[in-house]
Image (tube, grey):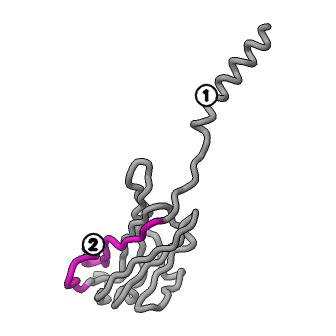
Amino acid sequence: MKKSGLFLLILCLLLSIAPFAAAKPAPNLTRVEITHIGADDTGWIMAGLSPKPTLYGQKFYIAVRFTGYPNPGRIFFYQNGNLIPRAEVTEPFGRKGLGNPHSVWVYQFAMPVVYGNGTIAVRAEGIQGGRHYDTIYGVTTVYHPEK
């Protein structure tokens, strides 16, 4: 009798914990939005400003907000319709999750300042599906050597 009571107690404990242990799939990517652009000597500016100021520095920075989860290996950047080589793009500042639970992520990327001219586009594919992009027009950057 003691063994069956102990078994029942353990079974009840395991069943009560099971709902908390079940992992839910990552939400599909539903939106990609360029929020800010910047350069070393200029700092960040909102992407929606018009006209956009000229950015100065050695690196061009772009902040992208993803709603849902992008596949990190399937995020692509384009300048004037041309793919920017993956080796030229870095993620120097990491990622910041927003929302509860984190359903929106802001990623920040850097690349050589020469890629920050003209039309800049970001295209991403989600971990669980979805393909979205955003474009910003009229970006101007000027190489400004370090002081």
Q: Secondary structure at mark 1?
A: helix
In the image, the segment drawn in magenta is 30-54
Secondary structure category for the residue under label 2:
strand
The image quadrant of residue 107 is bottom left
Q: Is residue 124 above or below residue 78?
A: above
Mark 2 Cα within 10 Å, few/some/many (few <14, many 20+)?
Answer: some
Q: Residue at x 23, y 83 (%)?
A: 52
**Nearer to me, 115 or 24:** 24
Residue shown at 43% from the left, 65% from the top: 66
Say which mark, if any, is on residue 44. 2
- Residue on which the image places disc 1: 16
Residue 71 visible at all: no
Where residue 41 sits, quadrant-wise, is bottom left
Magenta span contains residue 36: yes
Q: Which residue is most to the top?
A: 1
- Residue 21 placement, left or right of 41: right
From the viewer's side, name the closer residue of 89 and 136. 136
Q: CA distance from mark 2 to mark 1?
A: 48 Å
Q: Position of residue 8 (x, y in %)?
A: 72, 18
Residue 73 counted in the magenta span? no
* Residue type of the residue flagged with mark 1: Ser
On the image, the x and y values in percent for residue 124 come to: 50, 73
